[in-house]
Structure formats: structure tokens, C-alpha cells
Amino acid sequence: MKKLLLILSLPRTLIAYILARRTKIDEIFQDLNRFAYGGKKHDKEYLTFSEVIVFDKCFRNVLEFRLKKGHMLSAVILRVLFPVKKDMEIGRCDVGGGFVCFHGHGTVISANRIGENLSVWQGVTIGRNPKSPKAPTIGNNVSIYTNAVVAGDITIGNDVQISAGTVVMQDVPDNSLVIGNPCIIKKKQM
């Protein structure tokens, strides 16, 4: 059944693939690589693109987010061909390549800047808080798990894991594990 759906979707996936390729946005294919293979290198780019765009609505949201920056017509065409998740929002922010979102239900992302290889799960909120007009700045290789909140004019360092249900409203140094509400910051064991 899955193969039949892929075959029936080939015309629209080809159009979406051409739109993505024409933009020359490298981050799109870094995102694709993490969605499909967890960051491992593979050569079947178009086949992978077809599978991921047909079966993963979160990837569609990330792809639309990438296309909206300077390629609005491509983003509109993509949205017509492949509807996106209605309960996942990515605001206008600078996000490095390798961005992946798992499940995405109720996820809202609005940051000042986000580095490479961000992983988020469902119910994550990244944005401003009532006491601060600015959104967070997040480093590279950060994982934010289910129902976590990262809010305010704060900086999250590189190689940080934020546990499920954690509320972060303070700076977090590199190589940290953050748990709880109020959050407790622990250095990760190397």
C-alpha cells in the first residue's frame, strides 16, 4: 500500500523536489537527511525526498518554512501539493540546517536564532515571555523534548538536552542537561 501511494504521488513529489532544488537552499537537504536517516549520508536523494514529503507532515512544515524565505511562490505551490500540519508553527527566525521535528503536534517555534541540528518533539514552545520582548538564541546540536518551554531573552548553548516538561527561562551553558520546573541545569558527563 505504501509503495502504491508513493507511485501515485510521483508527479507532485517531482514538482516539489524541483522547487526545493531550484532554491539552492542547502539547509533543505540537511533537514531531509536528518528526517530520513538521522544524519547518516545516503545517495538516494529524490527517492528519500518522495518518501519523507508524502509520509511526514512535519517535514512539510519545515520545508515550507525554508521556502518562505525569498521563495514565497514555491512555498504556496508546495502547500497546495502537500498540506502542512495546522498545529505546528514555525515563525520567522534564522534556523541552521539539520532541523528536525518529531510529531510536531502543538509545537510553536519563534526564536531569535537557532543553530544547526535542532531536534524538537511535540508540544514544544520556543518564544518570548511576558517579561521579555526578545526570543531565545539557541546553539548547535540542541534537543528539546516533549512539552518543554524555552522562553525569554536567553541563550541556550551548544550540545544541550532539555528534558520533557522542562520550563527554561534562564541561560544554559554548553554541554548541559536541563530538567524540571523550575529548571535544574546539570553538566553532561563526557
Image (cartoon, rainbow, N blue to C red):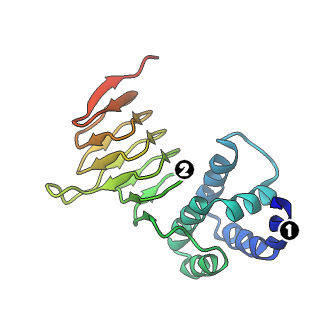
- Residue 65 in percent (x, y) is at 51, 66
Label of residue 7 in the image: 1
Q: Which of 108 and 106 is in front in this view?
A: 106
SS type, badge 1:
helix
Q: Which of 172 and 144 is in front in this view?
A: 144
Residue type, mark 2 in image: Phe
Instruction: Choose top left, top right, bottom left or bottom right for residue 32.
Output: bottom right
- Quadrant location of residue 131? bottom left
Give residue 38's position: percent from left, percent from top: 65, 41
Q: Residue at point 38% right, 47% down?
A: 147
Please state, as top left, top right, bottom left or bottom right, where the N terminus lies in the image: bottom right
Q: Please give the name of the residue rendered at 76% of the width and 62% of the height, measured from the top-left corner.
A: 50
Q: What element carries label 2?
A: loop
Q: What residue type is labelled 1?
A: Ile
Residue that label 2 marks? 102
Q: State how far apart marks 2 and 1 are (Cα).
A: 25 Å
Give the vertical position of 82 relative to 156 (above or below): below
Q: Taking 161 as reference, is 14 left or right?
A: right
Q: Which residue lies furthest to the left in this view?
A: 131
Q: Which residue is drawn at 45% across and 66% down?
A: 87
- Residue 90: x, y in percent? 44, 63
Horizontal side, residue 160 vs residue 167: left or right: right
Q: Position of residue 63 (x, y in %)?
A: 58, 64
With 54 as the anchor, is 163 left or right in this view? left
